[in-house]
Amino acid sequence: MKKVALHSLGCKVNSYETDAMTRLFEKSGYEIVPFTEKADIYVINTCTVTNIADRKSRQMLHRAKKNNPQSIVVAAGCYVQADSQRAAKDSAVDLVVGNDQKNQIVSLVEQLINGSGENAVTDIGCTRTYEPLSIEDAAEHTRAYIKVQDGCNQFCSYCLIPYARGRVRSRQPEEILSEAARLAKKGYQELVLTGIHLSSYGTDLTGNEELLQLVQSLHETEGIRRIRLGSLEPGIITESFAEGLAGLEKFCPHFHLSLQSGCDSVLERMNRHYTTKAYEEKCGLLRKTFDHPAITTDVIVGFPGETEEEFGVTEDFLKRLCLAEAHIFKYSRRKGTRADKMPDQVPDQVKARRSSRLLAVAASCGKTYRAGWQGRQAEALFEEQVSIGDELFWTGYTREYVRVAKKSRDNLENVILPVTVKEPLTEEILACESL
């Protein structure tokens, strides 16, 4: 029996696809082993969102070949799709597999073993159908991610993903519902819907099955007690969308709304399709519709041409919004994007300084948000036991994704309990007690 080791880099979509490829190998009789062990076949699902991601992808490919020089090393995913020629010339790589060929991974590997294999990278910009992939289990024990959509039509000026993932392609709702039912039977109580551009789900389907309708359908799945959404674009937040979700008992009011900049002139150069005024209105709508929802975001600092004044506008905007969490990224120059050719590239030391300032703002706002939970009642899904100081606690997350911890002699893994949120135990974990 041949041994296969798989490793995923990057986003939750990649993780899902790696789980799906693992299932395909298992069904074909292969033995799955950890990536650190000697294997006959290594599959690395690569990422290309930044230059660092490219470098990590290459490093993992070479690490696999070093683990076993006689092995077959497969480079799959976004790094391969974005630069297939470079990947194919890499001495560590035996086979390259693009982003719409992962469901053929086993047959492609077996063809290579039999001496007739060849690289499989197509022009993904021409792909219009969703690639059939599915999972039976997830890496986590309490929540499962379900990929419902692929591709992106936005073409932000800094991003390669539309070139690596192609145009928007949505999964048929009946396939999603079937997978959700299978996962529920395996004991998963929380589903997280994910995609490359989740807000566009359904825009390409006959009948226009949109995201709200999908969540409403999933809400009827027996055994599922929580439904959470991945990253959203601000434009999807309307009164009808928010009220529709608020009427669903299982929906988790945690909204990750991509911002990228708090300055309109920078947003325009980024080719983002909203203004800061519109973004702030969306946050206000969510806070009006839900009780203390978690709103989180991403921000890029040091975008080409970003002046001190523009950065200051972003900093002030984040302070005013005071979101539950903000992920701060330094702009990464990507060959092949419009932003790469823009003038006035910001020096690395300036990016680092601005990043530090926004990280401080984000930390302060996160602390304020968590403090607002003290004394409140919530519902926590517990996941794992951890040491905090000299004591053991069970930790988990509220529906708003606030991390809480509770002392218990019982095994609370995958248990949902109503709790009262108490004082901080660490910078990011709040104590809680059962109601």
Image (cartoon, rainbow, N blue to C red):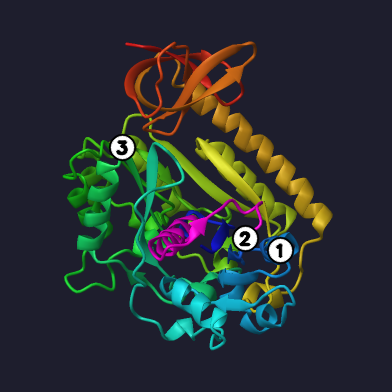
Identity of the residue drawn at 59% across and 71% down: 74
Residue named by callout 2: 39
Q: Nearer the N terminus, badge 3 or badge 1?
A: 1
Residue 352 counted in the magenta span: no
Q: Which residues are magenta?
A: 14-38
Asked whether disc 3 touches disc 1, contact meaning CB atoms under 8 Å apart, the reply is no
Residue position marked by numbered label 1 in the rendering: 68
* Left or right relative to 310: residue 393: left
Amino acid on which disc 2 is placed: Ala
Instruction: Say if 397 sits above or below 426 in the image.
Output: below
Query: Could you tell me if residue 304 is visible in this image?
Result: no
- Numbered disc 1: secondary structure: loop
Depth order, front residue of 281/430: 430
Identified by mark 1, the residue type is Asn
Q: Is residue 235 above or below residue 82?
A: above
Foreground residue among 210 and 116: 116
> In the rendered view, would you say 336 is above or below 380?
below
- The amino acid at mark 3 is Gln
Of the 4 image quadrants, the one containing the C terminus is top left
**Residue 35: within the magenta?**
yes
Would you say residue 33 is visible in this rendering? yes
**Identity of the residue furthest to the front in this view:** 1
At a point 34% along the width and 56% down the height, the residue shown is 236
Q: Secondary structure at mark 3?
A: loop
Task: Categorize mark 3 by other alpha carbons within 10 Å: few (<14), some (14-19), many (20+).
Answer: many
Please tell me how crowded label 1 is: few (under 14), some (14-19), or many (20+) other residues with Cα within 10 Å.
some
